[in-house]
Image: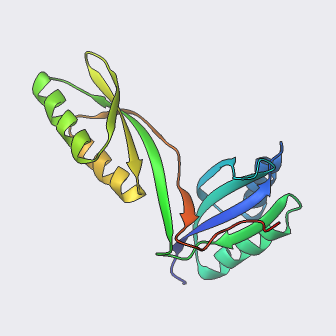
């Protein structure tokens, strides 16, 4: 059995309704699993950028790229080369705060992780953390002792490093 790996794929699509549905439907039909997907406008208002993270063996991942490229609204598909792209994810985390001492400990952890406290209640804090998925996972592991009440993660968004770009050249 082939080893599974994680790939980050940058996809430029027409910025119009229904495109995300078409991409998600492709994954459903082919029984591919999406680890995360982020979508938003690009530097060109007519083009949206999707960052899709998928796990699978090499053959499956090649099929994902080929099948995406066949979709009508897809303008460009490129697998981002490991180590040659920057990625970030945002998490909003509501943490239980049972005592003043634990509140202080949580605030110190937030500062170490360069996060921000964006809401304060008598029994909870809501924290915003941005970084790599590993950084977010590390923070969440530290918060297990006090208890994570709610969690929302955006999924990975990424760009190639340096002069390398994923663009439609006009």
The C terminus lies in which quarter of the figure?
bottom right
Location of residue 99 in the rendering, given as x and y in whole percent from the top left corner: 14, 23
From this viewpoint, which residue is outermost toward the left? 101
The N terminus lies in which quarter of the figure?
bottom right
Q: Residue at x 29, y 45 (%)?
A: 114
Q: Which sits in the foreground, 47 or 149?
A: 47
Q: Residue at x 10, y 28 (%)?
A: 101
Snapshot quadrant of residue 70: bottom right
Q: Residue at x 23, y 46 (%)?
A: 142
96 to the left or right of 86: left
From this viewpoint, which residue is outermost toward the top? 122
Snapshot quadrant of residue 28: bottom right
Q: Which sits in the foreground, 47 or 32?
A: 47
The reply to whether residue 77 is visible in this rendering is yes
Snapshot quadrant of residue 17: top right
* Colouring convention used in this rendered image of the protein: rainbow
Identify whether 22 is placed above or below 3. Answer: above
The reply to whether residue 144 is visible in this rendering is no
Location of residue 138 in the rendering, given as x and y in whole percent from the top left corner: 29, 53
Q: Which sits in the foreground, 148 or 138?
A: 138
From this viewpoint, which residue is outermost toward the right? 72
Q: Residue at x 32, y 41 (%)?
A: 115
Location of residue 8 in the rendering, given as x and y in whole percent from the top left corner: 58, 67
125 to the left or right of 36: left
Location of residue 43 in the rendering, given as x and y in whole percent from the top left corner: 69, 53
Numbered marks: total:
0
Identify whether 52 is placed above or below 67. Answer: above
């Amino acid at each position: 059995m082939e080893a599974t790996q994680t790939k980050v794929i940058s996809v430029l699509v027409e910025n119009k309704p229904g495109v995300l549905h078409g991409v998600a439907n492709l994954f459903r039909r082919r029984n591919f699993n999406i680890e995360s997907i982020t979508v938003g406008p690009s530097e060109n208002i007519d083009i949206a950028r999707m960052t899709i993270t998928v796990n699978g063996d090499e053959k499956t991942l090649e099929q994902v790229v080929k099948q995406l490229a066949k979709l009508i609204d897809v303008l460009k598909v490129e697998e981002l080369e490991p180590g040659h792209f920057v990625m970030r994810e945002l998490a909003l985390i509501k943490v239980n705060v049972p005592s003043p001492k634990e509140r202080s400990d949580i605030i110190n952890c937030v500062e170490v992780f360069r996060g921000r406290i964006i809401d304060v209640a008598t029994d909870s804090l809501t924290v915003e953390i941005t970084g790599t998925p590993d950084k977010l996972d590390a923070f969440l592991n530290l918060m297990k002792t006090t208890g994570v009440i709610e969690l929302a993660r955006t999924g990975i968004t990424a760009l190639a490093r340096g002069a390398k770009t994923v663009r439609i050249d006009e």
